[in-house]
Image: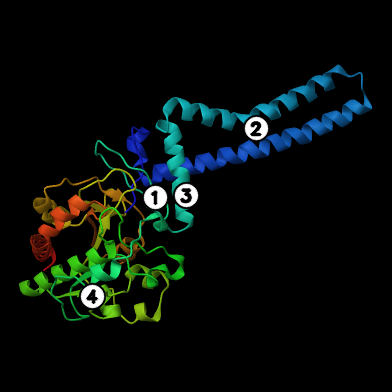
Amino acid sequence: MLILNCENLISSCCSDYALAKSLSIVNNILQLIHIIIPILLIIMAIKNLIELMQDPLEKKLVKKLMNKVLATIIIFFIPTIVNATLKMVSNSNDIYACLKAGSQLETMAKNDEIIYQTITEEKKYSIISNPKDYEKGEKEENITNNNDYQDSSISSNGNILLIAGHSYSPYCSQGGLGDCRGVSARSGYAEEVETRKLVKLIKSNLDNLGVKSDIANAMMAGDNDKMNKSFFIESRLNTALFNKFDWNHYKFVLEVHFNATSGSPAQGTLLCKKSSSYNTPADNDIVNAVISHTGNRRLQDSIQPLNNVSYFTKRNIPIVYLETEFYDNASAMKKYTAQINGIARDIALAIQKHYG
């Protein structure tokens, strides 16, 4: 998860996706006007110049020509002057920052990298616009081999589907879909490691509760330490492997992720949703299952058109997309890992309560 710097922006930091998109569209229209109108004025000025050459003594033609030249110069430079003024006055806040956020959002959308998040903490963090900007370390193999969770058997007939977010290199770079994360140099933790560790613990607890569940990564890759398959990659590429399974019969989906920021260390838990009005009965209980153990706060929901969320909601299957904790924060992860068994147990109890 990547966090956008949204300090003191209008309309709650453009936290509504539609607002940010609308601002981006308005900005694009202004850019077109910035180009088209000067071209039209230049054409008209050339016409006046030709007329003036035919009648050099006509003072009205001189005035018309000068007005068009002046108007062309003013219109061409107005956007530059306005942007510079807004940036100087507001220091990347208010309208300038909101327009900038909308522009960033559109660029990311074109690259299938939409990551849009606002938070209410006192400290705000800067955006990482590309998954490649995550730190990568050299200890990924060692971390994956030090798992302390119980292996679970592979199945494909459960009522609950668990998805571990992200995957390992080089598989994670397939199709240019940006599913790679890797080890954080700041903390030594890797998101793809932690997601698999947690979903396996959740499944083990669901098994003990008599609730049938499947791990999507294990279904596609086998139940080993890495389970190096991604629901995101396989579904986007519409692979034969993905189409081997019936993903439509599940009653509930939990997708597990961990957060990160390029700014000051952050901590807390949040959910990603397709809209501010989208909820499942299990939302609060699953978040509380984490924060009741970590003691950290619940951050504001992130509204994003995420691939996996859209896939299941279109099929009327409720999905919770959990950003468990900030994996690039060593102290937050130390606190989380000390409580991971209790967190997994309480998440399983929340799922059983609503969908068991």
**Real-space CA distance between mark 4 and mark 2, rounded to the nearest whole angstrom:** 59 Å
Q: Earlier in the sequence, mark 4 or mark 3?
A: 3
Q: Position of residue 51 (x, y in %)?
A: 88, 29
Q: Please state which amino acid type lies under the numbered disc 2.
A: Phe
The mark closer to the camera, 3 or 1, is: 1
**Real-space CA distance between mark 3 and mark 1, rounded to the nearest whole angstrom:** 14 Å
**Real-space CA distance between mark 1 and mark 2, rounded to the nearest whole angstrom:** 32 Å
Q: Please tell me in which quadrant of the rendered image residue 315 appears.
A: bottom left
Q: Is residue 266 left or right of residue 345?
A: right
The mark closer to the camera, 4 or 3, is: 4
Q: Earlier in the sequence, mark 4 or mark 2?
A: 2
Q: Please tell me in which quadrant of the rendered image residue 220 appears.
A: bottom left
The residue indicated by pointer 1 is 128
The residue indicated by pointer 2 is 76
Question: Can residue 210 be seen from the camera position used here?
Answer: no
Please rate how many residues cluster around mark 1, counting C-alpha atoms within 10 Å: few if below 14, some from 14 to 19, many from 20.
some
- Where's the C terminus, which quadrant? bottom left
Q: Is residue 136 left or right of residue 88?
A: left
Q: Is residue 165 above or below residue 223?
A: above
Q: Please state which amino acid type lies under the numbered disc 3.
A: Glu
Q: Is residue 349 above or below residue 76?
A: below
* SS at mark 1 in the image: loop
Front-lying residue, 150 or 313:
150
* SS at mark 2 in the image: helix
Q: Earlier in the sequence, mark 3 or mark 1?
A: 3
Query: Residue at position x 47%, y 49% from top?
Result: 106
- Where's the N terminus, which quadrant? bottom left
The residue indicated by pointer 4 is 225
